[in-house]
Image (cartoon, coloured by chain):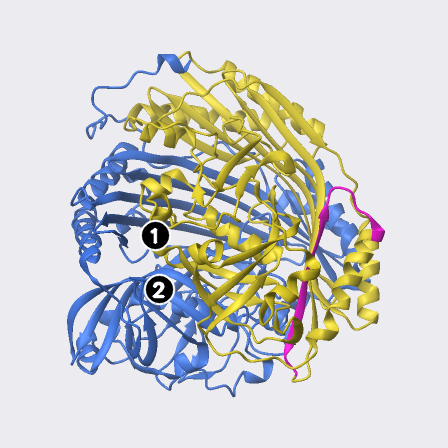
Chain colours: A blue, B yellow
Amino acid sequence: MSDSIKPESNPLPARRQDVNAPTLLITPQRPRFDPEKALNLIQKEAEWVGLRWVTETNQRRSARNGQPENNGAHFSCGVMIEALIDGHIAYAGTSDLSDQGLLRAAQNAALKAKEMTATKVYAASLKERPTSVGHYEGPKGRWLDSETLAALSEHLIECTRRLKVSEAIVTAVAEVSLIESEVWYLTSSGTNIQQRQFMTGQHFGAIAQGLGDTQQRSLNGPTARCQQGGLEAFDWDQLEAACESVGEQALALLKADNCPTETLDLILAADQMLLQIHESIGHPLELDRILGDERNYAGWSFVRPSDFGSLQYGSPLMNVTFDPAYPGEFASYRFDDGGAPATREFLIKEGLLVRGLGGLESQQRLGVQGVSNFRSSSWNRAPIDRMANINLEPGPTPLNDMIQHVERGILMEANRSWSIDDVRNKFQFGCEIGHLIEQGRITKILKNPNYRGVTVPFWRALAAVGDVTTRGHFGTPYCGKGEPHQMIRVGHASPACLFRDIEVFGGDS
Amino acid sequence: MKTLEAHRENFKALSERLYSSLHQSESMTLQLAFEDQDYLRFNQSKVRQITHVEQARLCMRFQSNGRRVVFSLDLSGDLHVDTRSLISLVARAKEEVRVLPEDPFLCPFENHGEHHEHHAGSLPPLAELLEAMGSYEAKRLDLAGLYAGGTLLRATSNSAGLHQSFSSDSFFLDYSLFTLNAAGDHKAVKGLYSGRAWSTPVFREKMAASESELPVLRAANKRLEPSRYRVFFSPKAVDALIGMFSWGGVSYSAYRQGESALQKLMAGEVRLSPQFRLEEDFGLSLIPRFNSLGEIAPASLPIIAHGDVKNLLISSRTAREYGVTGNQADTGEALRSPVMAPGDLSSSDILERLGTGLYVSNLHYLNWSDRLNARFTGMTRYACFWVEDGQIAAPIQDLRFDESLFTLFGSGLEAVTEGSEIIMATDTYHQRALGGTKVPGMLVDGVRFTL
């Protein structure tokens, strides 16, 4: 059959008026499923039963160097069943939604809950599964039926052309993801929650080669530009212009000096603050890490239970919130996957650690205050404590003022490299581009900017917090944790921040 | 869901139904990933969470008119329901290829024959695991970890007639045993028991061996200043280092697109040690030789030998794009069954040859810090020791390193152990992974530690 494939003369179909032209909206035929009927079927299998039905469509569309690269989608559909017996909750996930499949999964969970109750870590109760009724529908914006697939393909290819400002650009990539997710959680104790999220992600990046070097540059880093909402996230005129700048900066980095090796002041832009917050605030504050659940994989935490209310985590300028209702932020929701209502809470207030990141199970086990962040990556994984939207609150300082108060320093943008130890202390992070600051003004760009530090001393060196004009809200779809492993979406909003006396270094010459 | 055999049959029936619906100008590949697994998570030698997962994910690659679309979905296991879902996706795919731009690097699906492989195994009764946990708890041994066990199936077919499958029953217990040292610091030893046939005596032996390592960890930590040190990397640590070759390393497309850390090696600006030999060797039988398109890779393929790159991994699509000959690498062009050749350092000589330096058992969170120079950073983790004059002196406080592959596997490489370990993959993102590595330990001089 492949022999009959014939290339068309025009590889880029023109925008069409064809009313039958496929839009970006895909509506696959999924198995018919009634969650309420399903719960009725299985609820007698245990003392208490929960059922979480997840459906998700996740499209990935990309182009590279003027050609289409990926056009595809994953359609997820399945249930996770929870069974409580003798103070022990066991889980069974299945994509078999027939009556027999549901019963088999429920009976499996019930059997294991009963068999293993003597060896459980703690005695669960319905306190950790509060009865909640409600729904959440995230911002949908201009949704997928308002754009044709052909038009999106044209835009992506055009962006790669704009990124390729010279032959020295060996790779120009434009990629979008388009996600529609629905979770319906029902329990035998009366919980009935439906939540729908509409999300997009985008990546535009260039790699330049020449002068014996290779440098990459992208819009805010490879995975940062993700949010809830629709196609209004894609202002193509603006994006195409930004792609040209990205390409120019990748080229300029080839000629730039290496970041020096010295201790100086460091300003991190919002698109690097996201990583700094994620690794050195989000993960160490997760209560299940503090409880030791993660010790065999993601790691432990340097934070002890007694630190809540007493540890001066950072300078008094530091205010960090868990904010599940930040408009458009990537991990916004109204209830977590245990049914607990989610509200905005301060984790760190004026530098003092006040609250951890843990759902009701961890709060019960550890005896400290947490938030509603008991979340799972999909229907096939049990919920655990996960970050959601973790934000650094803006301060009073415009970026220009921050720069003017630096004698010698570097402004770094867009994450490129990240590594931190298993208790979240010693870190080393790298960025795509640095800007040298001398006597209060930016003098030149630097390549291979990296910095390293230790979490608490680093945050105590926070000397200025940018105002709202410096704030960006970003995130990542790839936060990994848990056993079995789970990849989950998180959001981080932050202004630019200034840190004093930080160890920076560059690449080998 | 259904038995393994039922899933095979279901896959075959779905394949036939979908291929019979195609027009002459259309072609398709289907790829199935099925698992029926128990996941038991432990903390404090008790059960933290138990999850049973039955899932079947089908990936459909549709090509027509010089265009391609890739859709995947979770199968219900009901042939009628799944056929209806897939037919609706085929209809969507046909709409998409009408309007997508032409893909100049499209590869035709070919018939690489029919091959089926099943590795039967025997899994442990979960009661035995729980009994062992009970005994650790009684001894106040603090174990955290994950047991995963069950059946995995991968199958590929295409409209040209290909049909391949690989299935196995297997398990792993990936664990950490924790203790407190004299200063109150938490220390741990890491262990992995994996295989296809559970053996209670072997399990007990492994656990006893891990337990026996705890007393030495109870000594006070030695704090080391950032500097260059001699280091012995255990096979588990070497496994992590070899992993870097699969992340912007041996991929040909990464090399051509400026994302490979081996650019200077390819350009002949640096050479690696002749002691370092790396190959892709499917003789481990932990993963099928066929890739997601059903193409069958060579049984073995030298990657690095005599200090140079012998082959980069090249998928068919990459081969078409750059006009080179492919070697049946999968999408992503990562190593699927890497084997590093052993050397001549006997296990009894390791500490003596190390002399004074670090014994590193495990590494954590590796990431490139200067890709052009193949430099990357990461942390020591678990049971790592300071060794003085060939004797273990003290456990260390974990250190950050920042060093180049060109040093570790090149100018700094002093010796490679004569013994190797097979390390089964423990990745469980989305579903449990197949695969593993076979690696020795290695002794390296002048490794740079920075924090």
Answer few, some or many: residues within 10 Å of disc 2's Cα (few below 14, many 20 plus, some between 14 and 19).
many
* Residue B249 point in image, percent of width and height: 42, 46
- Write down the residue under mark 2: A430
Q: Is residue A18 left or right of residue A92?
A: left
Q: What residue range appears in magenta? A: B184-201
Q: Are marks 2 and 1 in contact (CB under 8 Å)?
A: no
Q: Which residue is mark 1?
A: A229
Q: Chain of mark 1?
A: A
Which quadrant of the figure contains the C terminus of chain A?
Answer: bottom left
Q: Is residue B346 left or right of residue A156?
A: right
> If you read the primary sequence from the N terminus, does the residue marked by circle 2 or circle 1 appear first?
1
Image label count: 2
Q: Considering only vertical position in the picture, is A255 above or below B323?
A: below
As helix, strand or loop, the secondary structure at mark 1 comes to loop
Q: Residue at x 60, y 47 (%)?
A: A380
Does residue A106 lie above or below B284 as drawn? below
Q: Nearer the viewer, mark 2 or mark 1?
A: 2
Using the image, tell me which numbered label, if any, was put on residue B340: none
